Image: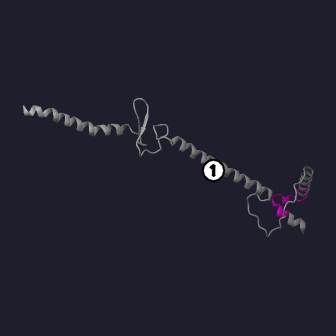
Amino acid sequence: MKVSGMKAPGLAFIFATFVAVLGPGARAEQRNKCGCYRDDGGICYCDKKAKCGCPGECEPKGCEEQRSRELQKQIDAETKKAEESGHRKRSGDENGDNGSTQESTKAPTRAASHKMSASQSKELARLIDLYLADHPDSRGRSLEEVRGDLQR
């Protein structure tokens, strides 16, 4: 009789141990890599040490806002880079620099004091065409070389 009386508490102990061992394991299987899980009602619960990194899943509060702030910072940085690049290109074009290095020993460069008018541009194009018609071998030469020949 003593044996049958000990079976009930023994079985209860074994059952409690089984639940204690498998209970957290079963719940841990439901957790995502962030340390969060959803209950049957769809409510998200997270551990105290839970971290962001599970977009579209159950995450700690504030992760979506943090991601949007980081994305906005990246967009701002890329926009700033593009604007600076555009400013450098525009200022380089205004100074006569098209991104390539010029050697100052070939010919002295003059700063553009003003922009040419449309009629001046047409006249310059006409003069260049006349010069190239008289000197067809100069078509492959640079403007600095042609300018040097004209100044001699």
**Magenta includes 133?**
yes
The one of 138 and 16 positioned closer to us in this rendering = 16
Question: Is 149 located above or below residue 118 in the figure?
Answer: below
Residue 118 placement, left or right of 62: right
Q: Residue at x 53, y 41 (%)?
A: 64
In the structure shown, which secondary structural element does the residue marked by tag 1 occupy? helix
Most foreground residue, 13 or 29: 13
Residue at point 62%, 46% (across, down): 75
Magenta-drawn stretch, dominant element (helix, strand or loop) = helix
Q: Nearer the viewer, residue 4 or 134?
A: 4
In this view of the protein, which residue sits in the foreground, 106 or 19? 19
Look at the image and tell me in which quarter the N terminus lies. top left
Residue 121 locus on image (x, y percent): 89, 52
Q: Residues within 10 Å of mark 1 (few under 14, many from 20)?
A: few
Q: Position of residue 120 (x, y in %)?
A: 92, 53
Q: Residue furthest top?
A: 41
Query: Farthest residue toward the left?
Result: 1
Instruction: Look at mark 1 in the image and give the residue it sits on.
Output: 77
The boundaries of the magenta stretch are: 132-146
Residue 82 vertical position relative to residue 101 in the rendered view, above or below: above
Place residue 109 in its image quadrant.
Answer: bottom right
The image shows residue 46 at horizontal and vertical percentages of 42, 40
Q: Position of residue 9 (x, y in %)?
A: 16, 34
Height in image: 140 above or below 73? below
How is the structure coloured here? one colour
Viewed as shown, does residue 75 lie left or right of 134?
A: left
Q: Residue at x 83, y 61 (%)?
A: 143
Above or below 122: residue 3: above
Q: Disc 1 marks which amino acid?
A: Ala
Q: Left or right: where does residue 122 sit relative to residue 5?
A: right
**Screen quadrant of the C terminus:** bottom right
